[in-house]
Amino acid sequence: MSDFSELMRPSTEGDRMETCVLSGTGMHFPWLQKYLNSVLTERKKEKAFAQTTTECLSLMQQALLKHQWQQAAGYMHSYLQVLEDWDVIKRQAAPEIIWKLGSEILFYHPKSSVETFNTFADRMKNIGVMNYLKISLQHALYLLHHGMLEDASRNLHQAETWRYGDKSSSQEVLINLVQAYKGLLQYYTWSKKKMELSQLDEEDYAYNTASQSMLNHSWKTSINLCALIQIPGVWDPFVKSYVEMLDFYGDRDGAREVLTNYAYDDKFPSNPNAHVYLYNFLKKEKAPREKLISVLKILYQIVPSHKLMFEFYRLLRKSEKEEDQKLGLEVLFGVLDFAGCTRNITAWKYLAKHLRQTLAGNRLAWIQELWDSRKNWWPNFHFSFFWAKSDWKEEKTLACEKALVAGILLGKGCRYFRYISKQDHQVLKKKMKRMKKSVKKFSIVKP
Amino acid sequence: MDLEEAKELKERCTQCAAVSWGVTDEGKYYCTSCHNVTERSKEVVDTAAIPNTKIQAISRGLKRKRKLEKGWDWYVCEGFQLILCQQVEALKTLGVGPELKNDVLHSFWKRYLQKSKQAYCKNPIRTRRRKTTALEDTPSHSDWDSEPELISDFICSSFAESEAESQPDLHTQKPFPIIKAPNSAYTCSGSLDGVEYSQRKEKGIVKMTVPRTLAFCYLSLLWQREAITLSDLLRFVEEGHIPYINTFEHFPEEMKLYGRDKLIFAIESWPIYEDIYKNTIELATFLDLPRFPDITKDCYLHPDILCMKYLMEVNLPDEMHNLTCQVVKMTGIGEADFLTFDPIAKKAKTVKYDVQAIAIIIVVLKLLFLLNDNLEWSLSDIAEKYNEKNKKDKPWFDFRKWYQVMKKSIDEKKQKWEEARAKYLWKSEKPLYLSSYNRPVVYKRREVVVNLQKQFSTLIDSTPVAEKQNPSSFQFNWTEENPNRTCFHGHSLQGILKKKGQSLTTMNSLYWLSTQKFCKSHCKHVTTYEESYFSQSYQFVISLFSFLLRIKTSSLHEEVSLIEKRIFKAKYNQSKKKPSKKKIRKVK
């Protein structure tokens, strides 16, 4: 609904676990809930108080959807009485709803200010024990959003030191997250200092002190960050900044270990970025090709249309192994399976070339194998008459490459190839001729 | 500073000669009348006494706290009495005569206390239980207006008690006084008999509840034949003109409510017409009341007058009143014997005057327009054409136009009503708690809510929330000027009626029954209302009127069917044998 709520939703394993607990199985069926409610109300007459709060909540949600912040505030004003509900379950569920909707209202309301938001957050933090950390964290994010880094940092510090008996240990993940965000803020100052440092002369007197304070910072930061990234989860910004710092101080092994762990540990959720980070790191390190290929192979399995796939393809081409060549072909086909890549000229160029070479090398079986699963839908997906016309109109070279591929895969008779080969163009004359020749020679569909 | 601390010093003060000593924080004696501090200090007998004084201090602290909570001694029935007082005062400001309070409600209440054996009888329950003689003679002199006296009697006795409690030596008393098992929520109460009251289950006794206070009010209104129907009464409650929710807020400060009292006096629901109606009958039978004063033609509750009122309310032409009167005559529901409430009769039953009047109007609408989603529109076409041609004449009533105007107004009203319901603030300023243990929690919660509300109230639209409207028995206001609120009162029924001989009859000769067959089993309903079986216009009319009265659509439909049963008695009795005079078309 809004960037704010996006901001407020750090995807953590902890969150996921909690929703599981809430709904029992981790699944959520709004219609089922409604049905259950109606069954319940049929059995026992609902009190007017409960009706009021339910009705009020739904009207407030409607007002929020319509961006009527003032009306929503009005409903919130009366919804707050749910905190005094005699029904314990409802009363305990209320603070979270109030916090979520209330912060939304205060974020957008024209008359609201940072101070209002702060008072609201401070009040809500202290209703019930279970919400303290979550609200503190989201409060800090709000402050960050408004560029108030120092306040945010102070807030996080307060949350970090918060303890409440057993309750605090059960919320360990949240505490780690709080610490990590604090670390992220420290990283921000660190990288600002790094910028300053790069502008200073090494001989300069200030250089030493600056680099010293930077070192201090990085030490604190890394402590804050490293606790979190041990826990399974998606921690991209934290990992990235942590690795950058390690790298800066020359701890390459440490950085590599963190990244490898982040990418390969089975307990972590599958995360393409983890492999991208590792690949980039290894590339910078000038790691052997084999190693790079193995990293990208996993990325290929998760996201076959990733933009790194061309780099992957080039690496595979350089390899002498036959299976890598075959994989290269697979990668190209895989990229072109995605609607977003249909007009990617590089992909088509690579494919045309690779197809020709493969056929020249008498590897028809490879192509057959890949083509079999696609021959039902690629003709309409890539090689329709419509595409032929629009490709020719907009990008003639692309049209030529595609026509070549179409000719090879579908034979001379296919619509795409026929349309393109009939076109007359001065500059591309030579190319067209070559294309027709190759099709004649290589087409897998013999007339 | 407690006086009892310094009782061991019997000397006279050197300055004012009084013998009244207190002990300062440093342990020195001072005179409480002139504040002269002496050099003598309280002797510490031996070291063993030091922890003892500590205990004293602690127990003193607890005692003070307890005193705060304690307040007056009061009984549950007094609470209800206070609520009734508030309600009847509100009725008085609405214009009801003063006799209602002083004569009617008072004697009903007295009768209730007597019948439920709480007072005005030889051996009231609570005196039996408490085994104190203090109360035995109070019933004889306690009067309606002496209600504060009643309480003050209790105060006196409670004062005596608390003094007696504080007298005994603190060393012999347990350091922690037990207050009626303070931790278990359901075993304590601020009132003296709250716990027993909620456990009491005697056969044949109608126990007081907050909704029953409204039944009391309605009974007295009925006795006085006041111009307030039950639906009016409930609407006034809803609009806040008659206290009902959180009435305990206005109890005297010293009447403390907690624990069981919360379950007795706190109300979190709107009164429902059917419930209060049932309660009224129950109560009247329990009180063994004689036949009520006759409801005659000149009473507000007579269907002829009520029909007029509702015709005005829903913007229908005055000429329809003629027809409603005829229906009333035909069915015989205008008779005093039928209308008058007689609780002693074999089967006590009072007429739902307001619902009945509305049902008559609906029957007349059906007679005139059939309401089959067809005839009413073609009649409207005719009326529209006529009105266009003859702009100077008295306009003919146009059902379609009426529908458009009514639909719009009722939708607006309904939306406002729903919004107000969704925004209603139920919680009292004076929160109720179940036990002294969770008292601070409850107060804290209240404080949090108030603070948060304060914060959000600054963000609400600056336009003031609709002011509390003045009480009125009308909910709509129709004028000629405003096209959205066109008034149809003066429109004529010509075009719908035709001359037949000397009298007028309706153009429409058909009719359909709202209920074909009445349910004869032992279940309580006589008919059901399944909306989708009925025509759109009938649905609209039913929902419009039931919203006006704030009752369920099904109960209005039932009332319509009952009226029809009376009109078409013949048809119901000898169905299928002979076609009755009026052709009756079946509903699907």
Image: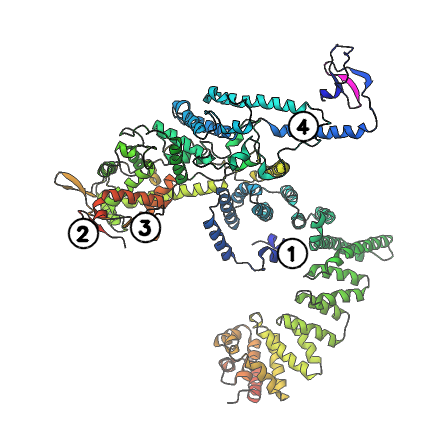
Q: Label 4 crowding class (10 Å Cα cut-off): few <14, some 14-19, many 20+?
A: few
Helix or strand or loop: what does disc 1 sit on? loop
Whether labels 1 and 4 belong to a single chain: the reply is: no
Helix or strand or loop: what does disc 4 sit on? helix
Name the residue that disc number 2 marks: B577
Q: Amino acid at mark 4?
A: Arg
Q: Amino acid at mark 1?
A: Pro
Q: Nearer the viewer, mark 1 or mark 4?
A: 4
Whether labels 3 and 1 belong to a single chain: the reply is: no
* Mark 4–mark 3 distance (CA, rounded to whole Å): 68 Å
The numbered dot on residue A10 is 1
Circle 3/circle 1 CB separation < 8 Å: no
Q: Amino acid at mark 3?
A: Gln
Q: Is residue A439 magenta?
A: no
**Chain at numbered mark 1:** A
Name the residue that disc number 4 marks: B64
Depth check, front residue: B29 or B89? B29
Helix or strand or loop: what does disc 3 sit on? helix
Query: Is A148 rendered above or below residue B290?
Result: below
Depth check, front residue: B470 or B265? B265
Depth check, front residue: A329 or B103? B103
Magenta range is B25-33
**Chain at numbered mark 3:** B
Q: Label 1 crowding class (10 Å Cα cut-off): few <14, some 14-19, many 20+?
A: some
Name the residue that disc number 3 marks: B536
Q: Amino acid at mark 2?
A: Lys
Question: Residue A362's x, y, as percent?
Answer: 62, 89
